[in-house]
Amino acid sequence: MASTNMLAVDFKRTERLSLAPPIKSYIQTAYAEDPDQYIDDFRALEALRGDIVVPDVHQASLNKLLKYYGQLCFLGGKFPIDENHIKICFLWHQVLAKEKKSVSSFSINFEKAGVLFNTAAMYSQLGVKQERGTAEGIKKACQYFQQAAGIFKFLLENLAEWNVPQIGDLQASILETLTNMMLGQAQECFWHKAVVDKLKDAIVAKLAMQAATFYETASQSAEGSGAFDKTWTTHLQVKKHHFNAAAQYRGSAECKGAGRYGEEIARLQLAQASVKKGMEHYLFKHALPHVQGDMKVTSARIRDGSGSLLTKHVNQNLQQMIENELRRAEKDNDIVYMEVVPRVETLVPIKGAVMVQATPLPTPAEMGDIVGTPVFSKLVPYAVHAAASLYSSKKDSLVKSEISKLEEATALCQSTLASMNLPSAIEALEQPIGLPPALLQRSQEVRNQGGARGLNDQWQTATTLGQKDAEILDEAVRILDDEAKEDEELRVQFRERWGRTPSKDLTNNLRDTVRNFRNKLEAAKKADQLVRGKIDTHIHFIESLSLTKEELEASIPSSTASSTLALKDPNVKELKTLLQQLTALLNKRQPLIDDVKKTSGADDIGAKLAELSIHGNEINEEAAFADQLQRYDPFASAVRESIAEQENLLNGIRSANSRFVESKQTNEMIRQREQALQNLDNAFKFFGEISKNLQEGIKFYTDFQNVLTKFRDNCKDYAFSRNVDKKDYLAQLQQSITNVPALPPRHGGGGGGYPNASPATGTQTGYPGMPPPGGIWNPNQAPQFGPGPYGAAPPGQLFYSSVPPQSMPPPLNGQQPPNYGGYGA
């Protein structure tokens, strides 16, 4: 600050962190997608976050801040990053508040506020660094200050809507102070240019008065906030008095030219009073040297048209100059003009000319050339995803309800037929000796599918897979528990010096996922037990169906009694006809169910909702859902018709069977044969049901194993990253305790730092990152990730390096302070 007469806002410090792991987990659980397909998006996001942690004062760093802010806006539209959903602990240190402590929040809007604060601070620092000895430098400085004011004003107006607590540096009074101070410095640039260009005194006076107004407004809010130190408060007060004096001085010169000599003296008296207030000892001693110089310096260095530096008298000692002018004016008036000097309170105030305004913060869309393509552009916005999920739930509920109606009707049909011993009673009469063709066909199907042994093998496979899934989840939990235990032990050991974010604050999302996965496994285990019960109940008859033709025929009672009833009884003919019609009806149901499942699987309302969202329309979920669900009306109608037809057929079968039972001739052997055939018929149905259940279970456990494996790997990545971060923290503590310089920073994959073993191969590297997902660690390959609280970081990112990347442009003016030209009035 000592090299200029203007103030810049310092950057808020933030801690390094990784956004990737909790977002990956959310994509996996909420979107039901593989997060690894968005690896490029994660790397880009990690790189942006790393770039803004320690910004340098130049345009490239400014663009990175703006780009990260824009991507945060896009990110917030896709993911609910807050304390109730995706938990990422954003931490920013205060820079202006009395207590320079850190403030943290899980809200993405808090992160946006911190980034915008630093963006405004960047604009202010760029403005201060401009060489205001040139017209171009003054213009650029003025633009930067207005842009800084625009962002501070944006924060002031939006923090409440963002639900960001206005505490610390984000207090309304602090933001109001910074907004008006930046506007005051921008207005001062206009005034400076007017003085250099020797514009009319009336114009210069109005410009100076408006600068004084901005500084006065900033001074009042600064005093009210109680957050600013003496440097800031005295700076604003001295600036206010300086520009009040400058405005009155220029006003007196205008009066002199217009022949209003009495008013000239009165305005010089006002100017003199303002200068005296600004130079009072308790204020002046705390002012910056160049601010003091604005009252004292007698010349300024500016550049001529060829760029050469010239010394040009812009003002004399302001106080002395005003006093000299006042003595001359009073003498001339006493001797020559003899005008009455009006009281200062009767003077017409000089109206300020506002030449600056807070430049509005562009939207991310308006900064498209800076922000670039939104990350996760292939994922629909969260609001759309939530609406699509709600529709999917309604759709699944509707389809499941209609399918359940069919399945319940089919089960009722089968139980009704079984209670009447159909069709076994007819088959036993038609073929009292040997095996019915239908039974032979069913037996062959069961043998082709492995029979009873095949069911037991499938059960064993499902059980083994379930145990493996549970072991993977247990391993993931052990990894988190071990890391948390180690972190807590270090916290107990070092107490308040161990200021690293506690593990429990970083793993809430992971722990929630564990509970969710554990519940899924418990539900699957209960389903397994139900299937086991079915197997135990029906395994005897399923084993019979698995026999060869000869073995099966020998196990079924046969009758040698001659029966012509099946040929003569008209009730048998009617029953067979009705049963054939019922079988045909039931056979139509599975293709109908398959068709609606196919339709449901392909039914994605997301595109329609996303299109509405893109066009800025408010999504009318009820209307959109109702329109989309109409495609299931034909299926619901077919279900109703099928159930109604089944009821009619069953009524006919009941009547015909009643007549058949009354008229048929039976013996004990025939009744035993009927029961045996019926048991085998039921066994065939349960075999198909159990086999389907087991196949679904095996598929579930197999698919879930992939999900659990990736989750376990995420936990390993997190623990590895925290281990690296722990070593860095311990090194810093060692340095602070022993005063011994810490080891040099460790870069992404180069040498130096602590040797660590890659979690994939154990290969010793200078500073390994995590292996690429599913890949093999190659010590000669640039690492894919680097250290951070969560672990994920982009290739080439130097997380703990204090050396700026060589691709960055050098600071303005080769790190030399800008040439300063003092000015007074």
Image (cartoon, grey):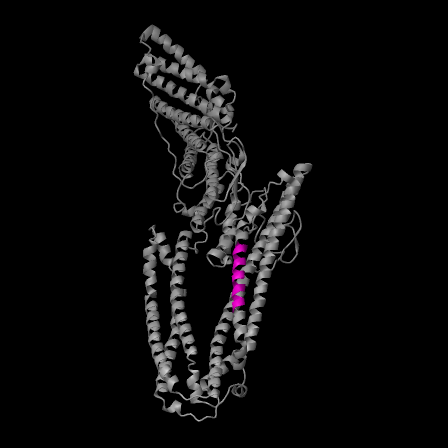
Residue 235, position as x, y percentages in the image: 47, 25
Q: Is residue 258 left or right of residue 220?
A: left
Nearest to the observer: residue 301 or residue 156 = 156
Q: What x and y, as percent, mark residue 107?
A: 47, 44
**Front-most of 802 and 731?**
731
Number of dots carrying numbers: 0
Q: Quadrant of residue 187?
A: top left
Tell me which secondary structure the magenta stretch mostly adopts: helix
Residue 521 among magenta residues: yes
Q: Is residue 354 left or right of residue 539?
A: left
Is 742 placed above or below 345 here?
below
Query: On the image, which quarter does residue 493 sit in?
Result: top right
- In the picture, the quarter occupied by the C terminus is top left
Asked whether residue 318 appears in the rendered view, the answer is no
Tell which of 317 and 397 is nearer to you. Answer: 397
Q: Position of residue 742 (x, y in %)?
A: 66, 41
Question: Where is residue 19 shown, x and y percent of the image?
Answer: 52, 49
Q: Is residue 297 above or below residue 336?
A: below
- Does residue 579 belong to the magenta stretch? no
Task: State whether residue 212 appears in this view.
Answer: yes
Q: What's drawn in magenta, residue-wise?
A: 513-530
Q: Is residue 300 above or below residue 695?
A: above
Q: From what the image shows, is residue 20 above or below residue 545?
A: above
Residue in the foreground of this view, choosing between 465 and 152: 465
Identity of the residue furthest to the top in this view: 335
